[in-house]
């Protein structure tokens, strides 16, 4: 299934799952968002749930799951850098060291392709990296709206905006004909992905509402490990030694960038 069509179906199902709860929350809300906030949340939803997933799905058509997850694991570090640039996080030596370690891990994971030359090109890797950049930007900019309004309506509205965007963009893929021709087993998979997306992104936005984007996105460090193991178990993708080394470097970089020295914590709490 083409990437835009898959993303559209995924978030259409997720939106339908959240809609009843969003309507109940809106009926209980005392104030309604102004138009400028609705436009901003629609833009963020289109980026977070539309552009990001479309780029990631395109990348996964050209890159195996494990190296794609390694590239996408730059998400939290990109969030840290962006938050620091906007004055919401303090850039430190530990942050810089963590960024360098993670970049070294990505370079190690792409080592065989560097030695093999251009081959199929770098469009897949570039798409995965671009999706991480879009996600970092949206994660930093989302929090003011999540603190202002209930999480469920924001989640549902963001998904609706992304579905409308993707429905237009996926016309080039001929999605109406593809959707009507899907067999039952494909609909079962799409339904599972959509329901998982609705539940997962609700908790994602709930976390962004109550925690800093850095702490939330740091948990994406689990992506390379789970993707590498599942790619090996389910897709029979190879698990080369340099991939494990790259995972170790990225994990060390994330830990270094997102934790404080124990002495510094004691001074602040004392």
Image (cartoon, grey):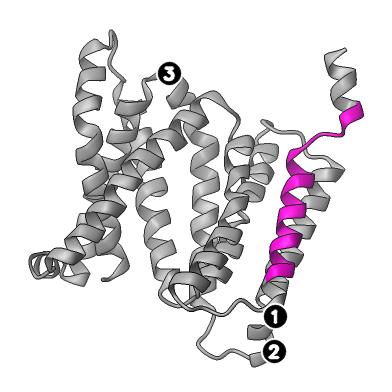
Of 257 and 80, nearer the camera is: 257
Quarter of the figure with the N terminus? bottom left
Q: Earlier in the sequence, mark 1 or mark 3?
A: 1
Give how far apart the Cα atoms at labels 1 and 3 are.
45 Å
Give how far apart the Cα atoms at labels 1 and 2 are.
6 Å
The residue carrying mark 2 is 115
Residue 12 position, x and y percent, is 22, 48
The residue carrying mark 1 is 111
Q: Which span of residues is magenta-colored?
A: 244-263
At a point 36% along the width and 34% down the height, the residue shown is 41
Eye-nearest disc, 1 or 3: 1
- Do the residues bearing badges 1 and 2 touch, measured as CB atoms within 8 Å? yes
At a point 40% along the width and 75% down the height, the residue shown is 61
Q: Does 248 appear in magenta?
A: yes
Residue 181 position, x and y percent, is 9, 70
What secondary structure is found at the residue carrying circle 1?
helix
The residue carrying mark 3 is 148
In the picture, measured across the screen, residue 117 lies left or right of residue 103, that is left
Eye-nearest disc, 2 or 3: 2
Q: Residue furthest top?
A: 30
Q: Does 61 appear in magenta?
A: no
């Amino acid at each position: 299934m083409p990437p835009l069509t898959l993303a559209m179906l995924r978030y259409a199902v997720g939106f339908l799952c959240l809609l009843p709860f969003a309507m109940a929350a809106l009926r209980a809300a005392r104030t309604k968002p102004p138009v400028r906030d609705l436009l901003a949340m629609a833009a963020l939803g289109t980026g977070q749930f539309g552009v990001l997933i479309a780029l990631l799905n395109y990348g996964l058509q050209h890159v195996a799951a494990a190296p794609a997850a390694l590239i996408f694991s730059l998400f939290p570090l990109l969030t840290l850098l962006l938050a620091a640039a906007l004055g919401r996080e303090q850039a430190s030596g530990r942050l810089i060291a963590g960024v360098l370690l993670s970049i070294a891990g990505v370079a190690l994971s792409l080592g065989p392709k560097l030695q093999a030359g251009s081959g199929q090109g770098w469009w897949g890797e570039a798409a995965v990296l671009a999706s991480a950049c879009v996600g970092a930007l949206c994660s930093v900019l989302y929090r003011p709206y999540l603190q202002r309004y209930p999480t469920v309506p924001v989640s549902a509205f963001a998904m609706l905006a992304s579905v409308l965007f993707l429905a237009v963009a996926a016309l080039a893929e001929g999605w109406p004909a593809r959707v009507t021709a899907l067999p039952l087993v494909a609909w079962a998979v799409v339904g599972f992905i959509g329901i998982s997306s609705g539940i997962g992104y609700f908790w994602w936005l709930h976390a962004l509402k109550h925690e800093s984007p850095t702490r939330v996105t740091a948990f994406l460090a689990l992506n390379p490990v789970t993707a590498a193991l599942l790619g090996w178990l389910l897709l029979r993708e190879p698990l080369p030694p340099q991939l494990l080394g790259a995972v170790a470097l990225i994990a060390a970089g994330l830990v270094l960038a997102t934790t404080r020295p124990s002495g510094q914590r004691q001074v602040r709490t004392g």
